[in-house]
Amino acid sequence: MTVKGPCMSALPVEKAEAHAMESGSESLETQDSQTPWRRWLMEMIVLNLVMIMWNTDNWVLPAVYTEIARHFNASPGDLASLGLVRGIFESVFALPSGFLADKLPRPLLVWLGAVVWAAALVGVTFSPSLSWMIFFRALNGVGLGIVQPLLFSLVADKSEAHGRGKAFGFLQFSGNVGQTAFTALATGIATYQIMSIAGWQFALLIVAVLSAVVGTLCVLLVDDQRERDPRSMMAIVCEETPKLRHIVCLPTFIIIIGQGVFGTAPWFAFSYLTMWLELNCFPHSQAAAIIACFNIGGALSGIVGGVLLDIVARRFPDHGPPGIAQVAVFLSLPLFATILFGLGGLDHKSPGTFIVFAMIFMLTGTLISWCMVMNNKMFSDIVPKEAYSYVFALDRAVEGTLGALGQPIVGWLTDEIFHFNAETANSQDCSPDDAMKLAKGIFLVSAVAFSVCFMFYGVGHYTYPRDRRIASHMRISSKGSSETESDGQEK
């Protein structure tokens, strides 16, 4: 009895210990399964923060064009140089980032680009003349160009093919929401004096500091799973450049680049919208709020377009992405005709007019901003995973360089063809006559560009299905061969 008792009492203890070990192993497995998800979520949050600051840097300067014009007594044609040099240098430095990504971690390059554009934005803030501001804006474009292709390739790498539409859609959503807040702040405080500097300069400084901080978070928290290439940089450039010929020769790539050359131009032209609203006698606060509604619409468009893309792509994988892009382009012209000309007869001092403008701007932003999500989805469907950095870099290099001409063309049309009076516009609180001249320049560029863009997407219905199937077969073949090789090594 004395021996049996302890044995019987030990049995529950053994069971309890065994249960504890099992529960402990289960909890460890649960933690292990949750860790990658938490890591992925943290990385995606940081990448979205990078997108916020990238978008903000692009749009914060146009948000204060009216103050810059008055500060330097400049016309729309003069201000166009700021957008042109930024677009050109951004595009030129996008392509080298694809090669650098094979040699250096992409988060490190994102940090480098963010620091460059932040430092250049400080230079823009305190430029003594418009010429110096143009110089620093060009340097600003260098940093922006390095970052964007790497940002898109990291997001594409870290998302599954069936959910890539939502990933890019949320990237656009967060970028537009953050940009909306910063540009509204910049326009709202532009005329104030803050700590012995102008309000618009203070806003630019905030953007510069936060850009450097977010870039640092990226290099600290985002992991790049790709192995570093042991070759020298010269060898990478010499050996990889011929391979780009395959990407450049893809019909769908040519279609997307072709539409982008024209489709990017109106977005450069839209940088004048804040100035147009203020010339139409809207106060700074209302102009900022209306543009914020446009940006919020663009943010919602990213989410709606991304979810819609994933749904439609499952049902219509061949024609869904180019078809949705065509819808967005088709709606652009009547909506902007309504904004620029249809609302011209309203009393801009009436509160009701502000509400009408805000609603139509938001509707327009929601319906015309899907194309970036569609393009990124199509790009990632037609090229191998290891080529993501290159394809996004090529896209930025070609589209940005030529698309940047949209802003100076608007400036030239406004100044030379429609005879914008800079002295009158800069000496008064508002000038509706000059606003109409600027509106004509914006709409003419947009009408031509969106019409050509629509036709390019139409051709995409014939090229995208074929290129997508070829890329899919290549992925399956390469996966099968790698599995065969691994089986052979195990044996």
Image (cartoon, rainbow, N blue to C red):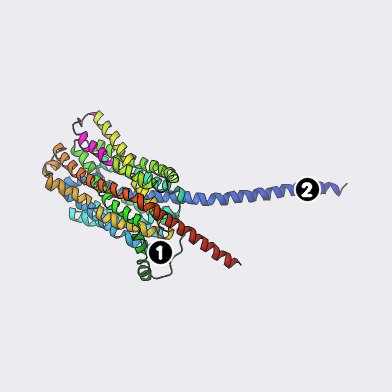
Question: Where on the picture, by quarter, is residue 174?
Answer: top left
Left or right of 416? Residue 378 is right
Separation of disc 1 and disc 2 at Cα? 60 Å
What range is drawn magenta here?
332-350
Magenta span includes 124 = no
The residue at the point 27 percent across, 47 percent down is: 267
- Is 262 or 458 nearer to us in this picture? 458
| Residue 447: image location, x then y, percent | 23, 44
- Is 101 or 479 nearer to us in this picture? 479
Q: Find the residue positioned furthest to the right.
A: 1
| Residue 121: image location, x then y, percent | 28, 53
Question: Where on the picture, by quarter, is residue 132?
Answer: bottom left
Callout in the foreground (1, 2): 1
Instruction: Name the residue type under label 1.
Output: Asp
| Residue 95 visible to the viewer | yes
- Is 45 or 412 nearer to us in this picture? 412
- Checking the image for residue 369, the label placed there is none
Instruction: Name the residue type under label 2.
Output: Leu
* Mark closest to the chain's N terminus, 1 or 2: 2
Q: Which residue is mark 1?
A: 102
Q: Which residue is mark 2?
A: 11
| Residue 222: image location, x then y, percent | 44, 55
SS label for mark 2: helix
Circles 1, 2 touching at the beta carbon (< 8 Å)? no
Left or right of 42? Residue 326 is left
SS label for mark 1: helix
